[in-house]
Amino acid sequence: LAFSHPGNNTPLFESVNLRLNPGMVLAVNGSNGSGKTTLARLFVGLLSPTRGQILADGVDLQQLAAPWWRDQLTYLPQEPKFIAGTLRDNLLLGREDLNDEDINQALETAGLKSFLDQKPAGLETNISETGKQLSLGVRRRLALARALLKNGRLVVFDEPTEGMDMEGNAMIYRVLNQMVEEKRTIILFSHDKNLLKGAHLYLNLSQKPIPELTARQVKRPTREEKEEST
């Protein structure tokens, strides 16, 4: 895989070759401007590679029907966008089949239940297109709740702990650990060392032009060890 911005002959990165099986975690790190968000957008199909292919179960992303592919994704962008409408409108984008119980479960998982309880209009609370009236932490949690409602098998989180307090970080770790147990394929873009150390593969985009790919042995706690720690 290689990508160059239009008009730029120097690739942002090239010769990226890797395979992710269900339950594997890829952590991507790099300095600002190294291409982390660009690679995230490539993985979810928002950009097309300059060279190479991204295959999902052996099929090129560009050959997949976009609505079907979006249903396979649990995507948390670094800078989430919102529409002008209610909280419900923003959470249900593309998932009109969900009910209030599903929504409330996602909000509780994302740590937004107390926030919602303080809103007289509840899920009918209006937000602007940018969501600027909300704090960064609330915007990030709201975007996470929306991503969780998609329930896709490919998880792509771009800087998920950015703007989060300690409680928010712990919530992100719990969510991701649960996704690993569910054998989802996870790609994380982060500077958070606690996230990076739990990955099976580590991609360093600061290494140019060919990023450095490192495989790691990850020992996760057994069920008995988890029970002993609680």
Image: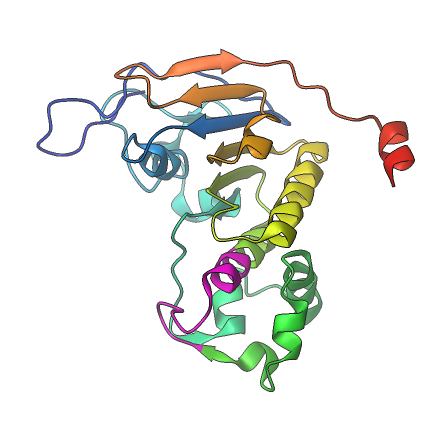
Q: Position of residue 135 (x, y in %)?
A: 47, 66
* Vertical placement of residue 156 versus 146, above or below: above
Q: Is residue 186 left or right of residue 134?
A: right
Part of the protein shown in magenta: 127-143
Q: Is residue 33 left or right of residue 151?
A: left
Q: Is residue 109 left or right of residue 8?
A: right
Q: Position of residue 46 (x, y in %)?
A: 33, 42
Q: Residue at x 42, y 48 (%)?
A: 77
Q: Position of residue 13 (x, y in %)?
A: 27, 22
Q: Residue at x 47, y 45 (%)?
A: 68
Of the 4 image quadrants, the one containing the C terminus is: top right
- How many numbered marks, from 0 up? 0
* Vertical placement of residue 202 versus 184, above or below: above
Instruction: Give the image quarter of residue 14.
Output: top left
Q: Is 128 inside the magenta-drawn segment?
A: yes
Q: Is 187 inside the magenta-drawn segment?
A: no
Identify which residue, 73 or 41, lies in the foreground.
41
Instruction: Say whether residue 93 is visible.
Output: no
Identify which residue, 225 or 90, lies in the foreground.
225
Q: Residue at x 40, y 69 (%)?
A: 131
Identify which residue, 184 or 192, lies in the foreground.
192
* Vertical placement of residue 190 versus 52, above or below: below
* Vertical placement of residue 150 versus 174, above or below: below
Of the 4 image quadrants, the one containing the N terminus is: top left
Q: Position of residue 115 (x, y in %)?
A: 61, 72
Instruction: Give the image quarter of residue 146.
Output: bottom right
Residue at far bottom of view: 120
